[in-house]
Image: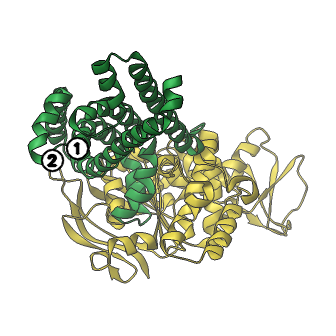
Amino acid sequence: MSAIRFANVTKQFADASHTAVDGVSFEVEAGSFVVLLGPSGCGKTTLMKMVNRLYEPTSGTIFVGEDDITTLDKIVLRRRIGYVIQQVGLFPHMTVAENVGIVPDLLKWPRDKIKARVNELLDLVELPPDEYATRYPGQLSGGQQQRVGVARALAGEPEVILMDEPFGAIDAITRTTLQDELLYLQQKLHKTILFVTHDVEEALRLADQIVIMREGQVVQMDSPVNILRQPADAFVSQLMGSQDLLRLLRLVKITAVMTPLPNTQNTPPTTFTLPATADCHTALSLLLPHPEALVIVENEAGQPVGRVTLADIQQLLRAEMAEAA
Amino acid sequence: MSYVLNNWDIILRLLGEHIWMTGAALLISTLVAVPLSLVLVRSEKLTTAVLGFLSVLYTIPSIALLILLLPVFGLGRTAVVAALVIYSQIILVRNMVVAWQSVSPQLMEAAAGVGMSNRQRWWRVQLPLAMPIIIAGERVAAVVSVAIATIGAKFGAGGLGTLLFDGIAQNRYDKILWGTIFCALLAIVLNQSLLWLETRVASAPLKSA
C-alpha cells in the first residue's frame, strides 16, 4: 500500500517564469525511506511542502494513505504528519519538553500522557529527560537540536514524516552520527519518511528509494544501487558520480560477495572480522594493505557465517565495469 | 518638604489622576495598536504610509492637539486620554511592526507545519517572541505619556500638572519643584518596572540562543 501518492502534481508560482513542479507522479510505499534529491531549485522542497499543504498544487492530486489531502482539514492533516526542518524550526521560547510535546498538546492529549510520551521520545533520541527536558533550544548543540526536531516529529504518532534538509546546517561528523541514528530509529519504527536533500552521499546512505528531480520533473526513481548502476541519463550519472566504483562498493553488503562457511581450508596469515551489515568498501579498505588476508563475516550472534577475500571484491568490480561498458 | 507633608492628600489625588490618565491611555492605545500593526505587517507600502501619517500627528504641539479635540470630547480627562492615545500610536505601532517582523518566517512556517491554526501561531509563537520589543515600545510610550499628561491641568483634567501651573501662577517654587519631582519619579518607576518585565520576558528562553 502506498503511504503517499503524487498524481500528476504541478505547481506554478504566480511570480515565477518556470514551473516549480511539473507533472510529478510517483508513489511512496508505506514504511519506506524515500529521498528527494536534486540541485537547488529543482522543486524538491516545493513538492514536499505540498504534502502538508504549506503549498497548494496548481493542478494534480496528492494522497496521504487513502485520502485526497484536499478533502482533509489542513490543520488535522498536519497533525497527522511529522515535519522536520533545519534547527530554526524549534520554538526558542519553549523548553525541549514543550517543543517535543507540541503536537500531542495540540491534539489535546491528557497532560500525563504527553509527559510520558515526551520522556519516551527523549530517551529514544538519547537526550535523557532528567537532563534535557527543561532546557531551551538555545542551550543545545546543533546536533542535539536536530534530535529534538526528530523527537517532535515523532510525538503525534504520525503515519508519515517529512524531513526538509534536516542535517543541512550541521558539521560533517555530527551529520554522519545523526544519519546513523535516523537509520537505527527507522529500523525500529518503520515510518514512512520523505526526505529532501541535495547531498548525494546522504541520499545514498539513507534511502530505500531515491527520487532524482531536475527542473520540476522526476528524472529517475530507483534504489541507490540501481541508480548508480543504471543512471537514466547523463545528468543523473554526473549528479550521482555513477562512474565512481568505490561509491558503489559502499552500497553492496559483504554478504553479497562472501563465500559461505564452513569452507575455510587453511588459515591465512591475517584475518579480520566484520559484521554482516558491513559494506564492500569497508572490506576493501581492510584487504588492500593485506592482499593475502581474509575477512570473516559474523552474524548478529557473533558466529562466523562466511568469508571474503580481495579476489571476491575484484570479481564484483569486474562485473560492474563489464555492465557499465 | 513642609509643602509635601502638609498637602500629601492633594498630591496623592493628583498623582492618582496622573496615573489614571497615563494607564487608560496606554491600555487603549495598545488595544488600537495591536490590530493596526498586525494589518500593517502584511503590506510594506501601507506601513510606510500609516507610520508617516502617525509621525505627522506626533509633531502637532500638545496644546494645539487638545484644543482640536475639545469639540469632540469636551473639557476633562477624556480629551487628555484621547490626545495621549494619538501620540502613543506612532511609538507603539512602529515597535509592534518591528516586533512581529522579528519572528522569522521559517519559524512561523514550522508552527504551521506542526499543525497550529493561525490563532495558535500568533498566541503561542509570534506573541511570546515579539513580547520584549512590544514592551520596549510600551515603556517609551509610558514615559512620554507621563510628560504630556501634565498639560491636562490646563484642560480641567487634574494630574500633577496642576502643581506646575498653580506654582507658575502663584510664584510658588515649592509647588513647581514637587510637581516636577513626582512626575519624574512616576516616569522612572514606570520605566524601571517595564524594563524589568522586558528583560524577564526575554531572558529565560533567549539566553545563549
**For mark 2, does the 10 Å Cα neighbourhood hold few (<14), some (14 to 19), or many (20 or more) residues?**
some
Dot 2 lies on which element?
Answer: helix
Height in image: B27 above or below B199? below
Q: Is residue A247 above or below residue A190?
A: above
Q: Chain of mark 1?
A: B
Q: Is residue A314 among the parts visible in the rendering?
A: no
Q: Are marks 1 and 2 on the same chain?
A: yes
Residue name at image x 59 percent, y 44 percent: B204
Nearer to us in this view, A124 or B110: B110
Where residue A145 sits: x, y (%)? 59, 49
**Disc 2 chain ID:** B
Residue A97 x, y percent position in the rendering? 62, 60
Residue A61 horizontal side relative to residue B127, left or right: left
Taking the spot 17% from the left edge, 35% from the top edge, the residue there is B66
Q: Nearer the viewer, residue A247 or A85?
A: A85
Please name the colour scheme applied to the rendered image: by chain
Residue A75 appears at what percent x and percent y?
37, 71
| Labels 1 & 2 near each other (Cβ < 8 A) | yes
| Hue used for the chain lettered B | green
**What is the number of callouts on the image?**
2
Tell me if residue B44 comes above or below residue A231 in the rendering: above
Q: Is residue A63 left or right of residue B44?
A: right
Q: Position of residue A220 (x, y in %)?
A: 35, 59
Q: Which residue is mark 2?
A: B73
Q: Which mark is residue B76?
A: 1
Q: Secondary structure at mark 1?
A: loop
Amino acid carrying mark 1 in the image: Gly
What color does chain A have in the rendering?
Answer: yellow
Which disc, if any, is residue A239? none
Q: The residue under label 2 is which amino acid type? A: Phe
Closer to the observer: label 1 or label 2? 1
